[in-house]
Amino acid sequence: MALIGAALVPAGAHAAWGTNNQHQLVPAYFYPDWWNATNHWYRMCDAMNVSGGPSTAVMNPNSGPGAAANPDYAQALARCHARGQRVVGYVHTSYGARPLAAVRADIDAHYAFYPSIDGIFVDEMSTDPATRSYYQSIYAYIRRKPGARQVVGNPGVAASTAWQLNTPVADVVIVFEGTAAQYLGWTPPGWVRNRVASQISDLVYSTPDDATMRQVCARSKTLNAGSMYVTDDALPNPWDTLPAQPYWTSSIAACH
């Protein structure tokens, strides 16, 4: 991660955690029914790894911030912060085709509705360097916000070069989003292994059993993923629930 609190952290600070101390980055696209003792948000933020730095949950009220502040999300955000976790707000960019004014409006709304939010999850990020100026504009806009301003970019695939991190247009980049079967046969471009691990994240779904999950976690360490999320959930929306026990805590222990 390149940002803790409100300031950029020197490159050497990334060494606090990596493939030998993996963290979680969870697309938490499920409602925070915090009044239920076993609700997913509390289970998630109570368990994610905070050794050497926070893990990250992605808050997505309605394919973005929604029309108004939601006290249930505010409650979940407070619980995650109390557990030392980071929460970023979802914004989509349609691979560089969405109007910047609409993207900025979503960013503004996240910070207005949830002032203690820790940054923005930029979904549908393009891998094409021709979109560099578009994403530079978004990154600069987020970095001008008060408080925490981490930028997580999700192209879902690895770009051919590290331009997204080098420019930068993101502090953390998700270089893989797909099934366990795809992940176990995937080889990233060389630059992925040469970055600080905490800048690299993978999201793996359709991982149906404990043995496959452990294979995925072992593979992630060889692919330089400093943060991971692995789930048995599947398409059409593999991020709409948290794995049940004991899968959830076992995955944290395996991807750690």
Image (cartoon, helix red, strand yellow):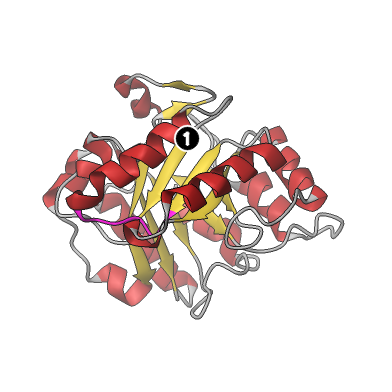
Image coords of residue 120 (percent x, y): 51, 43
Q: Residue at x 32, y 38 (%)?
A: 136
Q: Nearer the viewer, residue 31 or 46?
A: 31
**Magenta highlight range:** 123-128
- Residue type marked 1: Ile
61 to the left or right of 139: right
Q: How many residues crowd around disc 1 within 10 Å: few (fewer than 14), some, or many (20 or more)?
A: many
| Image quadrant occupied by the N terminus | top left
Q: Name the residue beneath numbered marker 1.
A: 142
> Compared to 8, does 102 lie above or below?
below
Residue located farthest toward the bottom when viewing the structure as drawn: 236
137 to the left or right of 230: left
> Compared to 111, does 215 lie above or below?
below
Q: Nearer the viewer, residue 213 or 158?
A: 158
Q: Residue at x 41, y 59 (%)?
A: 98
Q: Residue at x 60, y 69 (%)?
A: 240
44 to the left or right of 158: right
